[in-house]
Image (cartoon, rainbow, N blue to C red):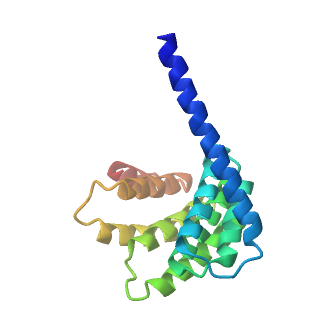
Amino acid sequence: MNENISDIQQIKDKDWDMMEKNKKHLRKLIKNFQYSETTIDSNILDLFEKLGDYTSIAENSYEKSLTILEKIYEFSAIKTKTSEILQKIGLDYYNMGKYEKALEFNNKSLMMKEKIHSNRPDHPNFALTLHNIGLVYDKMRNFEKALEYYDKSLKIAEKVYLNRPDHPALPTLFSNIGSVYNNMEKYENAIEYNDKS
């Protein structure tokens, strides 16, 4: 038994060492990247983005993730990726409790998505961004605005997931709307949406 534990620990240590080496390499790329061209290859963008995710999740350090993601945004010419990066920056600000900045970046993401998907106003990406904006307003205790954005998100999600009523986006939205109504002391509405979740 102790042998197995020792083997698992060695594998874990090797994986951790490899991840640390990759992380150092990516940080070096980012440091040097600021002097390079303003357009970047999609694969490089993915690597930078992964480092931002790793930093945010593994170290729970939103400031580091934010710095990386903002650098990616600054140099990105790939608009679909850019809208995702803006959304991630907004999420990091949300997680840090900086709600005005979270709104700013989520709104930038929404505007970018409106340009990208101008012929598809019910694209699922809209639902997620609108939901995120609703979350920010909810945290700011601006319940009317939160409901407005949750409702917009719900309308799109219901169209998109019409044939998939068990999709997790719907119960999450119902629950969040129910929570807002509860905070507004509109308990009948709260019960209605919580029952749907």
Please state if 6 lies on the left or on the right of 194 as rendered.
right
Q: Nearer the viewer, residue 6 or 170?
A: 6
Task: Give coordinates of residue 150: x percent, y percent.
Answer: 47, 66
Q: Nearer the viewer, residue 165 or 30?
A: 30
Task: Give coordinates of residue 103: x percent, y percent.
Answer: 64, 69
The part of the image, by quadrant, that contains residue 78 is bottom right
* Residue 123, above or below 182: below
Q: Nearer the viewer, residue 99 or 6?
A: 6
Q: Is residue 166 visible?
A: yes
* Residue 45, above or below 12: below
Number of numbered discs visible in the structure rendering? 0
Q: Is residue 55 visible?
A: no
* Residue 51, above or below 86: above
The part of the image, by quadrant, that contains residue 75 is bottom right
Q: Residue lying furthest top in this view?
A: 1
Q: Residue drawn 62% across and 63% down?
A: 48
* Residue 194, above or below 151: above
Task: Give coordinates of residue 159: x percent, y percent.
Answer: 30, 71
Q: Nearer the viewer, residue 72 or 123?
A: 72
Task: Give coordinates of residue 153: x percent, y percent.
Answer: 43, 69
Please state if 187 lies on the left or on the right of 57 as rendered.
left
Q: Residue lying furthest left in this view?
A: 163
Q: Residue drawn 39% across and 58% down?
A: 169
Q: Residue drawn 39% across and 67% down?
A: 154
